[in-house]
Image: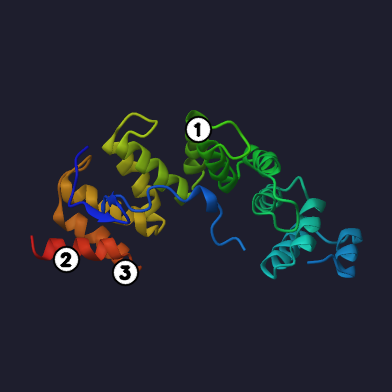
Amino acid sequence: MKSIFLLCMVGMCWHPLLAHKYHDGSTIILNLFSSVSSSLVSDLNDTSVSELDVLERANKARKAHEYEKAYHLYLSISTNKEAQYQIGVMYFQGRGVPQSYSEAEKWWRKAAGQGNADAQYDLGKLYLYGFGVPQSYSEATKYYLKAAEGGSVLAQHDIGVMYFEGDHVPQSYSEAEKWWRKAAEQGYAASQHNLGGLYFKGWGVPQSYSEAEKWWRKAAGQGYIEAQKGLLLLKHR
C-alpha cells in the first residue's frame, strides 16, 4: 500500500493520513450517556402524554443516569425507532438492565429496520467484532453502508477507510473520497483530515495543495493534531 510519512506509536506504525481507522469495538457507543419513581408510573398511565413527550422524558432520565426509569419509559413507546435504539444501547452497556449483546442486537435490528442510522452503524459493529452475532464482514459492511447512506458520519468515515485500504471491499480511492467528503461536509474532523491527505497525494482526486490546505485547516480548526502537522508539512514542502 502507498505510504506517507509513517509515524510509529505504541509499538505500531500509524498512517497520519488515516485517522481513527475504526472506533474501538469495546466502546461502540461514544458519549451516550436508578430507580423507578412514582412519576414514572404517572408518565406511563397518562394517556394525554404524547410519544414525543415520553421520549423527551426518557432521554432526560438517561442523561441524569436514572437508567431504570429511562428504560421503562423507552419500553412504553417501544415501536419508536429512537426508543428501540436507546434500549439497545442500554443492553449493550448494561445500564438499567442486565448487559446483553443479544438483546442489544434485537433492539438495534428493530430500529435499523425503521431506518435509524445509528442502529445500523452499531449493528455493523456487532457483526464486525462478533458481539452477540456470528462475526461477518459482509454483514458489517452491509449495515455500515446503510448507515452511511442514512447520514451517519461515523459510518461514512469508516466506509471511506475500508475503501481506502481495500478492507473487505474493493480498494478504491475515489470511493474513499466520496464517503470522506460526505462526512467532512458534516464537519467530521477525521474525514476532513483524510480528504486533505488525498488532495496532498493526488489519490482519487486531482493533486491540489490548496485543497489539501483547505480541508486540513477545517480539521485543524477543531483541534485535530494530525491536520495541524499536515499544515506544517505544506508550509515547509
SS assignment at label 3: loop
- Which residue is depicted at the point 36% across and 59% down? 189
- Which residue is depicted at the point 74% across and 62% down? 67
Q: Quadrant of the N terminus?
A: top left
Q: Which mark is residue 60?
A: none
Q: Position of residue 12 (x, y in %)?
A: 30, 50
Q: Which residue is mark 3?
A: 221
Mark 2 near mark 1, Cβ–Cβ under 8 Å? no
- Which residue is depicted at the point 76% across and 45% down? 79
Q: Which mark is residue 142?
A: 1
* Front one among 175 and 158: 158
Q: Residues within 10 Å of mark 1 (few under 14, many from 20)?
A: some
Q: In the rendered image of this protein, does residue 170 appear above or below residue 82?
A: above
Mark 2 vs 3, N-terminal side: 3
| Circle 1: residue type | Lys
Q: Which residue is mark 2?
A: 232
Position of 133 with respect to 151 (left or right) is right
| Circle 3: residue type | Gly
Residue 178 placement: quadrant? top left
Mark 1 vs 3, N-terminal side: 1
* Front one among 199 and 225: 225
Q: Nearer the viewer, mark 2 or mark 3?
A: 2
Mark 2 vs 1, N-terminal side: 1
Q: Position of residue 143 (x, y in %)?
A: 53, 36
Position of 148 with respect to 216 (left or right) is right
Q: In the rendered image of this protein, does residue 84 appear above or below residue 232?
A: above
Q: Position of residue 215 (x, y in %)?
A: 27, 58
Q: Quadrant of the C terminus?
A: bottom left
Q: Residues within 10 Å of mark 3 (few under 14, many from 20)?
A: few
